[in-house]
Image (cartoon, rainbow, N blue to C red):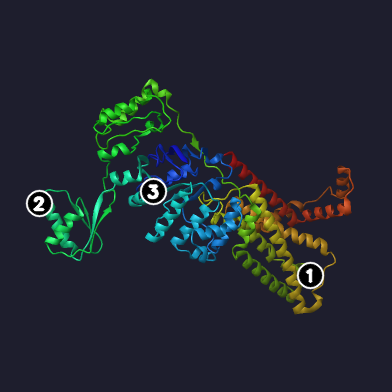
């Protein structure tokens, strides 16, 4: 069951809140429609329920608010907009990422794909999907973790009649298995046709809460659909006869040869057409729209719950007015509900529409004001609790998620191929020109370039790790952001490290092979100090990859991540060199021996030598600048993470 209590959005500048004190229930095993015209507050209501927008109120999903549920995605399936996946990712790849995020096995992908009818399109790219197929994919993402509740914002919007009928069939099947379904729509006929209960919003307020049959009877106007090749003539005759008989009949000319007749019957229209010899192709009763000024008839009041403004939604008493009661009596009863005995049922306040204006002494608004000012008003509950927008949870299997994200599109493969080809060509060109040391030849690193192609490629791949997340947020699509969680950061750093290490090794191997093929064995030898050079080379590429990951995670942009990588040799290295250029009075000779004495233990396997090599590596201008940059970026990332958690 879904229970929404007192949902109120924060007031906008010089405007009332988009949603004001909305309370309702959506029961399990039933489909509930949230109906309202565009701008009525449907989407805002859903976002307040899902704690995606600040405001007041609380929503219980099977007795627990969303932030108290350990794994919200396993309890509530959400579809608020189009699936914001990478256009080059396949349907199966997108669902595989979501599987890793919500912690369900990969076999669930095949089950959901079959359920939503995407078996033949599972290898299609997201950028090529139509509106209907995109809605099927969004529904598949919502159903992937087999949630109890489904919350969907206008799921059939823009779909054909066939696609809409199929989608509502899926929702009906989910409800038949005991699930709770809540969807929003602006089409009253769709709500009456597909839902079990209809909740109507108008101007951000709840105006009716009815069963679908009562809604269709009291809020929709019945009409007769007529198709005839002489539609204009028949419409004129129907209007003329209605005026002569002084009957209220409205004839609306639709597209083509169709008429919609309100206030008449099939028998009357058929007799008129027969008398005047007019051919009729269709004559059928239909459920029309709500009309421009639809109100609740008197016979529908007993079955509808029309919630009066403000305080009555939080009252605990129930009033049951009769059909012949006046509005003033109803207002008096509502104002005195604080003296009525409390019940377990939600408060129900019924008011006739249009009977009084707010300025009249007996109006409902003044009754509520008097009720709030009375001594008994202190017994009413306080304002609903504020809604805090919390950070999205981290994927339950972050390493698996990151691997599927990185390998699901061709950007990483294309970047690696570009790096290898450019590095091989550049090394051959540098060897032809001469005056380049062999270590720089193997790395394809000209003296005038800030970084070699391999380091730039590793930095770009690291920046894409977070940059693509913010551009196509698959983890928190409804929030439009990415959770800055340490588990996700560790997974991205680990995958970026492995990628950078592979890129560094492949680059040196390709350069060696190209130099051997073009110039022979003279330039294809291995340097004598290959161990320290390898450590420096791997440290450079991995450091650039980490800098790209951290900077893109902080500034939420791939461009910012790559700019941070380039800023290390262009900005930070000159600053470090300028700092170290001055005279040195003290030197760090014997650092490893003093460190061994401090720890009171012997370094195994010649560990002191490796510690000294690492210290020399950090002491280099590029190594020191890279270490300094990584430390600053990591501190900034942790500060941003802690700040968001405090908020």
- In the image, residue 160 sits, relative to residue 104, either above or below, namely below
Mark 2 crowdedness (10 Å alpha carbons): few <14, some 14-19, many ≥20: few
Residue shown at 58%/45% (left/top)?
A: 71
Question: In the image, 154: left or right of 646?
Answer: left
| Closer to viewer: mark 3 or mark 2 | 3
Q: Earlier in the sequence, mark 1 or mark 2?
A: 2
Work out whether residue 261 can be spotted: yes
Q: Earlier in the sequence, mark 3 or mark 2?
A: 3
Give the structural element (helix, strand or loop) at label 1.
helix
Residue shown at 59%/41% (left/top)?
A: 645
Across and down, in percent, residue 44 comes to 43, 45
Considering depth in this image, is 375 or 209 the residue closer to the camera? 209
Mark 1 crowdedness (10 Å alpha carbons): few <14, some 14-19, many ≥20: some
Give the structural element (helix, strand or loop) at label 3.
loop
Q: Does the residue at mark 3 contact the one at mark 2 (Cβ under 8 Å)?
A: no
Across and down, in percent, residue 151 comes to 46, 48
Q: Residue furthest top?
A: 375
Across and down, in percent, residue 30 comes to 43, 46
Q: Does the residue at mark 3 contact the one at mark 1 (Cβ under 8 Å)?
A: no
Considering depth in this image, is 348 or 82 the residue closer to the camera? 348
| Cα separation between marks 1 and 2 | 104 Å
Q: Does the residue at mark 1 contact the one at mark 2 (Cβ under 8 Å)?
A: no
Q: Tag on residue 180?
A: none
| Cα separation between marks 3 and 1 | 74 Å
For label 1, the residue is: 438
Q: Tag on residue 244?
A: 2
| Cα separation between marks 3 and 2 | 41 Å
Q: Residue furthest left?
A: 244
Mark 3 crowdedness (10 Å alpha carbons): few <14, some 14-19, many ≥20: many
Q: Tag on residue 195?
A: 3
Give the structural element (helix, strand or loop) at label 2.
helix
């Amino acid at each position: 069951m879904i229970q929404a209590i007192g949902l109120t959005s924060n007031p906008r500048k010089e405007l009332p809140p988009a949603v004001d004190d909305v309370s309702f229930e959506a029961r399990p095993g039933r489909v509930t429609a949230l109906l309202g015209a565009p701008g009525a507050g449907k989407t805002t209501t859903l976002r307040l329920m899902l704690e995606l927008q600040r405001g007041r109120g609380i929503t219980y999903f099977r007795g627990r608010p969303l932030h108290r549920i350990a794994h919200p995605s396993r309890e509530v399936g959400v579809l608020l907009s189009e699936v914001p996946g990478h256009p080059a990712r396949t349907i199966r790849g997108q669902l595989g990422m979501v599987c890793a995020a919500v912690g369900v096995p990969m076999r669930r992908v095949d089950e959901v794909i079959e359920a939503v009818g995407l078996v033949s399109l599972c290898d299609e790219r997201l950028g090529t999907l139509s509106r209907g197929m995109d809605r099927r994919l969004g529904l598949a993402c919502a159903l992937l973790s087999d949630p109890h509740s489904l919350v969907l914002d206008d799921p059939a919007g823009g779909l054909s009649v066939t696609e809409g009928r199929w989608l509502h069939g899926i929702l009906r099947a989910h409800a038949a298995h005991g699930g709770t379904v809540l969807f929003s729509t602006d089409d009253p006929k769709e709500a009456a046709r597909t839902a079990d209960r209809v909740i109507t919003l108008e101007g951000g307020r709840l105006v009716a809460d009815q069963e679908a049959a009562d809604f269709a009877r009291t809020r929709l106007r019945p009409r007769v659909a007529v198709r005839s090749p002489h539609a204009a003539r028949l419409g004129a005759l129907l209007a003329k006869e209605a005026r002569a008989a002084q009957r209220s009949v409205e004839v609306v000319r639709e597209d083509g040869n169709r008429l919609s007749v309100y206030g008449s019957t099939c028998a009357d229209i058929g007799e008129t057409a027969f008398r005047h010899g007019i051919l009729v192709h269709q004559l059928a009763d239909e459920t029309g729209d709500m009309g421009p000024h639809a109100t609740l008839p008197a016979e529908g009041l007993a079955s509808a719950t029309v919630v009066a403004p403000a305080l009555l939604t939080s009252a605990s008493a129930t009033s049951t007015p009769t059909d012949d009661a006046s509005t003033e009596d109803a207002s008096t009863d509502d104002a005195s509900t604080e003296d009525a005995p409390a019940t377990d049922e939600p408060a129900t306040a019924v008011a006739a529409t249009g009977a009084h204006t707010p300025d009249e002494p007996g109006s409902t608004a003044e009754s509520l004001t008097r009720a709030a000012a009375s001594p008994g008003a202190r017994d009413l509950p306080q304002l609903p609790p504020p809604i805090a927008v919390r950070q999205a949870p981290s994927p339950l299997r972050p390493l698996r998620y990151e691997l599927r994200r990185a390998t699901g599109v061709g950007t990483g493969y294309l970047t690696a191929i570009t790096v290898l080809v450019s590095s091989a060509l550049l090394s051959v060109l540098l060897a032809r020109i001469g005056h380049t040391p062999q270590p720089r030849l193997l790395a394809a690193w000209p003296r005038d370039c800030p970084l070699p192609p391999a380091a730039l490629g590793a930095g770009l791949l690291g920046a894409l790790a977070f940059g693509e997340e913010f551009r196509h947020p698959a983890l928190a699509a409804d929030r439009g952001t990415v959770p800055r969680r340490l588990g996700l950061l560790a997974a991205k750093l680990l995958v970026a490290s492995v990628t950078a290490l592979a890129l560094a090794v492949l680059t040196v191997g390709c350069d060696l092979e190209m130099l051997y093929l073009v110039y022979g064995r003279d330039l294809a030898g291995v340097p004598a100090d290959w161990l320290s050079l390898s450590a420096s080379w791997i440290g450079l590429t991995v450091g650039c990859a980490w800098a790209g990951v951290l900077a893109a995670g902080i500034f939420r942009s791939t461009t910012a991540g790559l700019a941070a990588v380039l800023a290390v040799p262009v900005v930070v290295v000159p600053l470090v060199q300028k700092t170290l250029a001055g005279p040195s009075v003290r030197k760090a000779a014997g650092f490893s021996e003093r460190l061994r004495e401090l720890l009171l233990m012997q370094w195994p396997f010649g560990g002191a030598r490796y510690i000294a090599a690492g210290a020399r590596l950090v002491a280099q201008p590029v190594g020191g600048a890279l270490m300094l940059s990584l430390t600053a970026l990591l501190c900034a990332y942790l500060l941003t993470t802690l700040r968001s958690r405090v908020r």
